[in-house]
Image (cartoon, rainbow, N blue to C red):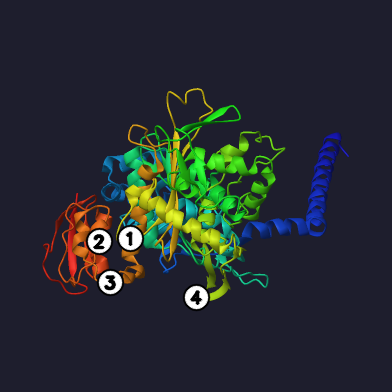
Amino acid sequence: MPVEEKNILNRFYFIAGGMFIVAAVIAFKLLTIQFVQGDEYRAKAKKNTTQNFVINANRGNVYADDGSLLATSVPKYDVRFDAITVSSANFKEHLVPLSKELGKMFKKKPSYYQNLFRKARANKNRYLLVARGLGYSDYVKVKSMPLFNKGPYKGGIIIEQHTEREHPLGKIGERLVGNQKKGEPGAYEVGFEGAFDTYLKGKDGRRLKQKIGKGQWKPVYDDNEVEPQDGYDIISTINVNMQDIAHHALLKQMQYYEAEHGSVIVMEVATGEIKAVSNLGVTSSGKYYEKLNYAVGESHEPGSTFKVMAMMAALEDEVIDTSTVVDTKKGSKRFYGRNIHDSKRGGYGEISAARALEVSSNIGLATIITDNYANKPMQFIDQLKDWSLNEKVGIPIKGEGVPMIPEPGHSKWSKNALPSMAYGYNLRMTPLQTLTFYNAIANDGVMVRPRFIREIRVMNNRVERFDTEIINDKICSDETLNKMREILKNVVKRGTGRSLYSEYFSMAGKTGTARTEYWMEDWEKDKRYISSFAGYFPAENPKYSCIVVIHKPSTKKGYYGADVTGPVFKRIAQKIFTDSPLIDEVPNLNEEDLMLADDFESYYKSTNTVITNVPNVIGMAGMDAVSLLENKGLKVAVVGNGTVAKQSISKGEPFKNGQKITLNLK
């Protein structure tokens, strides 16, 4: 065979052999994929075309005691734009009309959207954010706009739905209800949302879906499919009307006194149900909002409101009586090398123990406790412990502040600890803990645990009910209780709270004024105080207890509890009284006179007149006017904000039950 032919033949064999080897390798690889790695690749393919999706459960609602919504989940929609999927013709034709509609809806110039969409198209942006967090009606409007109405493929519109928690009451009571934790969807830490998250969150489901192209998935049948279980609803003890009253009464006083922060709690005496909680803190711009849950979480030196506990301990131990004479000197007395002062210049001299509490004498209470417990301090401390004042009240809401009652051996204990504790220093309590004790005084000595929730419901069926819990079935003897209740009435009638006294509406309680941050070097230059008032109403047959605490009011305007917090207590008490069935206890009330004074004093004057005429509400705060008129049976419409400038039905005109009246506010 010629050499040339032989070379050609060798090259053929070589190429054929190479091809055979390649074919063999390919065959081997195919067999390996098919039989060795087949399961792995089939699993990957399946994963790319089918996927288990989490189906989120609907979170339960939070309701007020009358069924009003405090928190609910609502669907929200984000609108995005795929600038690539839209054809050039469609984009060019609809860009201008789409931009005009968006500009009109979102208060922006059409040119803003034209530039936005052109830039997205130039950059091949397939996920341009157009609008975020739209409600359903706005979402429907956007979806029907030019270009977007062509759908996701021709119109490029991408809709992403999620749920957000909304509070129909707005910012009122926001800290109590609780918010979603920022940056963590579905995470709740505080308030009802955090405390009862186990009930509210429900159980997520799981559903298998198959990819059908272009990011679209369709459900497929799966034996392991799990349907979501919606969360339970919780019925709280909060009363919307009382919450509104407490919020605005506190806000008004905080604004006037330019205070740093404050809180209010209203509790139903017999049941321990919390009817209202308001917490307000100031921002750098001077606005007030629900900043922190001070009422539950902030423990501080209570000041003079603690004198009630000190006096009751001495009365219960029978080391004094209300008539025991106490020498308060001339307003200053030395205890273990430290002077204690009273607020009255020249002092009160020799007064009864009862009077010492009525006028809130620091020296009087320090003398009573020191004279009788200096050699046996644990007898006094043990009495406080018997009342659980050294323990949290044990509510389900997270963040309850820790009380502090020192005793011998404690880092805060010294010879001066006992006289300091007598008038509310050198110890710490939260407003809720203090109110729990005052509520027990009002409740014939029965201390009940504050309660925020009535029941758990699912599909309007009760799942669980929360009843009144008793912490201490009798905190003291009836004799001690009756003496203390009489003193608390007299505090308002002739003591430090006498400016709050009303001949026509009885209240009982104790004022409190405590220095705060007094250990700081600049205190003498810039004095800071905590003002408080704790008590209950009506005094004779208490229905509600209440505490008001305001931190760091402007000392230029006042800082005593009777001036700063007492009026808040009075306003809340009287408005709750006028807006509730309690009003039936005072017959023949002339509501017309109510309009003559902001503090509602005239409301309680007894007459034989049956009111059928419209009262004058011009000049009143809008909230107060609405409350009064609705209580009379009128249907009120409000225009504007602020105080009433005009009323559609003039003063004195007769009206029918359910008749509409319009108030113009400014």
Q: Where is residue 635 in the image (x, y as percent from the top left)?
A: 23, 68
In the rendered image of this protein, does residue 232 appear above or below residue 153? below
- Residue 603 tag number: 2
Q: Badge 1 local density, few (<14 within 10 Å), some, or many (20+)?
A: many
Amino acid carrying mark 1 in the image: Phe
Q: Which residue is drawn at 54% across and 28% down?
A: 519
Residue 63 x, y percent position in the rendering: 46, 65
Mark 3 highlights which residue? 587
- Residue at the spot of label 1: 505
Q: How crowded is mark 3: few (under 14 residues within 10 Å), some or many (20 or more)?
A: few
Residue at horizontal 42%, vertical 69%?
A: 67
Q: Are marks 1 and 2 in contact (CB under 8 Å)?
A: yes
Sequence-wise, the earlier of marks 3 and 4 is 4
Give the alpha-carbon distance from disc 1 to disc 2, as whole Å. Answer: 9 Å
Asked whether the beta carbons under mark 2 and mark 4 sit within 8 Å of each other, the answer is: no
Q: From mark 3 to mark 4, how far is it between C-alphas? A: 38 Å
Q: Mark 4 points at which residue?
A: 460
Residue type pointed to by label 4:
Asn
Q: Distance between the residues labelled 4 and 1?
A: 40 Å
